[in-house]
Amino acid sequence: MRVALLAHELFPDRAKTAVGVLRYADHEVAAVLDRTRAGERVADHLPEVQDAPIVAGIDDVDEPLDALIVGIAPIGGGFDESWRPDVAGALERGCDVFAGLHYFLGDDEEFAALAEANDCRLWDVRRPPDDLTVAEGRADEVAADVVLTVGTDCSTGKMTTTMELAASARERGIDAAVVPTGQTGILIEGWGIAVDRTVSDFTAGAVEQMVRERGDDHDLLVVEGQGAITHPAYSAVTCGILHGAMPDALVLCHEAGREAVHGYESFPIPDPSQHVALYEDLAAPVAAASVAGGSLNTSHIADDAAAQAAVSAFGDAIDAPATDPVRFGTDTVLDAIR
């Protein structure tokens, strides 16, 4: 499928959905839409992913085009009205539109009418299924080993670590699958439930449902974590995933140098070692799980030696093997969780 990614004014640093699709999805990216970077290329910013031109709007994207993906999800998941011409323009061209917002495009009268008139699909990936229920505490019955990525904050690399661990396991001949719990993972994998949109009582049940659906068909499941147990806004989602997945092991994700919660800078991030104790203590009453490894995002450290030193210090802090999965691979952490 040939797609365009909408990432206005936020590419690449705050457009993690767009970056995730570029790095992991099985799509040809025709262009990235960012009006502030028009004329540049993806490779100018992210040389390790597929390259594409950066353009000002949907009218600048060459045919053929199958879909427009909204590649950003701001705090609160709202729709920015400045995106309307691009979404409408894509639908008028007969393109499907996929979005991971809390604002459902399918409920927008203009977009719904355009989609119907042009035989397009509007996929609101955060719209939960209707058959969710409470958890039964049975996710640990599956045959697969279950690993959950957890974090010290949002946007610390949980989705990236999930994808890298699963890909590395497959390279070793391990039958591994990803359980997507957020909009980026769902857009990459093509299935899943965005748990931050579920009724609170059903969050753990949604994760349990996905684990049980896939857990007997694979040897390893890597569950995509969300938020952080210490986050002032999103801790409930984190706890729901932890208890719903009933994982065998945890991988703690952190960004090098980040000291305060993103968007909530008055809240300092507790030391990673405190997070280890918090996650393990919180998991224990439902299903005991230890932090078997760590993943450190060192993308803001230019020098490889300095990045490796930061990874080593992070591993010492959490008393577990650690890596930057994009920069140094996942072998040490995969060995630990297996």
Image: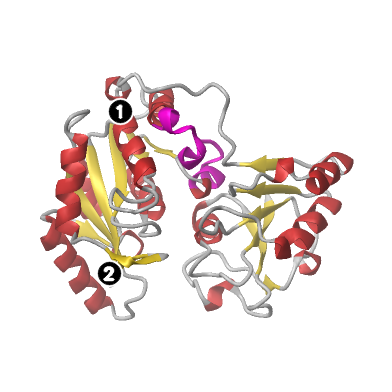
Residue 200: image quadrant is top left
Closer to the camera, 132 or 115? 132
Confirm whether residue 10 shows in the render: yes
Residue displayed at 53% across by 63% down: 15
Identify whether 172 is placed above or below 299.
Answer: above
Name the amino acid type tagged 2. Glu
Q: Is residue 104 left or right of residue 150?
A: right
Mark 1 and mark 2 in contact (Cβ < 8 Å)?
no
Give the residue at x 37% y 29%. 218
Span colored in magenta: 185-203
Label 2 sits on residue: 259
Q: Is residue 212 left or right of residue 102?
A: left
Residue 174 at least partly seen: no
The magenta stretch spans residue 190: yes
Give the quadrant of the C terminus.
top left
Residue 314 in picture, x, y percent from top left: 18, 64
Amino acid at circle 1: Ala
Q: Main secondary structure of the magenta part?
A: helix
Q: Position of residue 56 (x, y in %)?
A: 72, 73
Per the image, is 238 magenta? no
Q: Which residue is mark 1?
A: 144
Q: Hey, which quadrant is residue 62 in on the image? A: bottom right
Q: Residue at x 56, y 46 (%)?
A: 187
Given the current orientation, which residue lies at the most extreme right position? 117
Tell me where residue 283 appears, x and y as whole percent: 21, 36
